[in-house]
Amino acid sequence: MKGTFEVDTGDGRPPSGDASERAAAVREAMEGLLQIRRLMNGHLTDPSSRPADWERRQPVRAVALVLEAAGIPPSAVDADGQCCATGYRVRPGEQLGSVRVEWLGPPGSGAAAGQHEALQRCARVLEGLGWPALEYRGARRQRWLEAEPVT
């Protein structure tokens, strides 16, 4: 994989290139994130259980990396900006430092039917790495998670 590693927030184009190269880059980025945690949170019994300051300053990138590293697929949009892949989308949350995780898919994909289960899987992954998440349901039964780093 050439160039700078960019996390996949689920807002971009479908990935191009070699999937195994992407997977290796994600693993390497996640190992780097955990190393940052060990260095910054070394005073804790489990330094990997609490987000580091870097993550708190860039919560969308941090959460997207955690989800992709866990093997959860990101959503994607086509050239017209229409959703073309089922998966997570991470955006800034309502509160400063929080994130909103949605589960999206193309029209007719059935993503809405599996939204609750998919978001609960995302919540388990995030909570295990210090990002407690609450699920909300809004208009038209749309569900999402709101996650914040533990302090």
Image (spheres, helix red, strand yellow):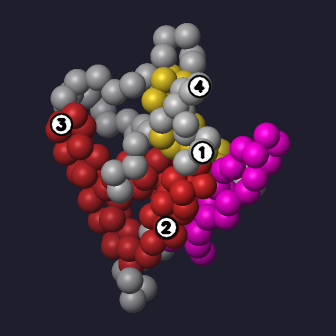
Residue beneath the point at 68% across and 60% down: 135
Which residue position is annotated with label 4?
107
Q: Amino acid at mark 4?
A: Pro
Disc nearer the start of the sequence (3/2):
3
Which residue position is annotated with label 2?
124
Which residue position is annotated with label 1?
113
Q: Are marks 3 and 2 in contact (CB under 8 Å)?
A: no
Residue beneath the point at 19% across and 45% down: 24
Find numbered disc 2 in the image and state the secondary structure of the residue it sits on: helix
Q: Are marks 1 and 3 in contact (CB under 8 Å)?
A: no
Disc nearer the start of the sequence (1/4):
4
- Comparing 70 with 140, the one in front is 140
Q: Is residue 72 magenta?
A: no
- Comparing 81 with 64, the one in front is 81
**Crowding near the residue tagged with mark 2, few <14, some 14–19, many ≥20 C-alpha atoms within 10 Å:** few
Q: Residues in magenta?
A: 130-151
